[in-house]
């Protein structure tokens, strides 16, 4: 995906196409921050655009495989 200069407005079909490309990146495992960095958009704009195209968001925090709950 082409990196855009920060602050450039995008609307209409171009916005939808960009949002769908961002969705593909996010659903392939990229974080919102990684998508934002690779596209030149802010975290907030990426988050909004993902919501606009109906993306199911992952929970916060990522995997914690070594988490141990000590119940005594």
Image (spheres, rainbow, N blue to C red):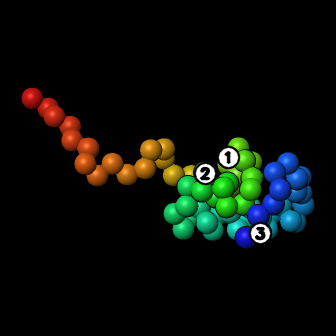
Q: Position of residue 15 (x, y in %)?
A: 83, 61
Whether residue 48 appears in this view of the structure is: no
Image point (33%, 48%), residue name: 64
Element type at marker 2?
helix
Q: Are marks 2 and 3 in contact (CB under 8 Å)?
A: no
Kindly indicate whether the residue at mark 2 contacts the one at mark 1 (C-beta within 8 angstroms): yes
Residue 2: which numbered mark, if any? 3
Mark 2 vs mark 3, CA separation in Å: 16 Å
Could you say which is closer to the camera, residue 59 or residue 45?
Answer: 45
Residue 63 picture location, percent across and down? 37, 51
Give the quarter of the figure containing the N terminus: bottom right
Write down the residue under mark 1: 43
In the rendered structure, which disc, 1 or 2, sits on the residue that comes first in sequence?
Answer: 2
Residue in view at x 85 percent, y 48 percent = 7
Q: Secondary structure at mark 3?
A: loop
Residue lying at 56% horizontally and 64% vertically, measured from the top left: 27
Dot placed on the residue nearer the N-terminal end, 2 or 3: 3
């Amino acid at each position: 995906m082409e990196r855009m200069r920060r602050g450039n407005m995008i609307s209409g079909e171009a916005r939808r196409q960009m949002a769908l490309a961002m969705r593909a990146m996010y659903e392939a495992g990229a974080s919102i921050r990684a998508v934002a960095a690779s596209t030149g958009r802010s975290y907030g704009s990426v988050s909004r655009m993902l919501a606009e195209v109906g993306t199911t968001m992952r929970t916060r925090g990522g995997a914690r495989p070594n988490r141990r709950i000590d119940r005594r």
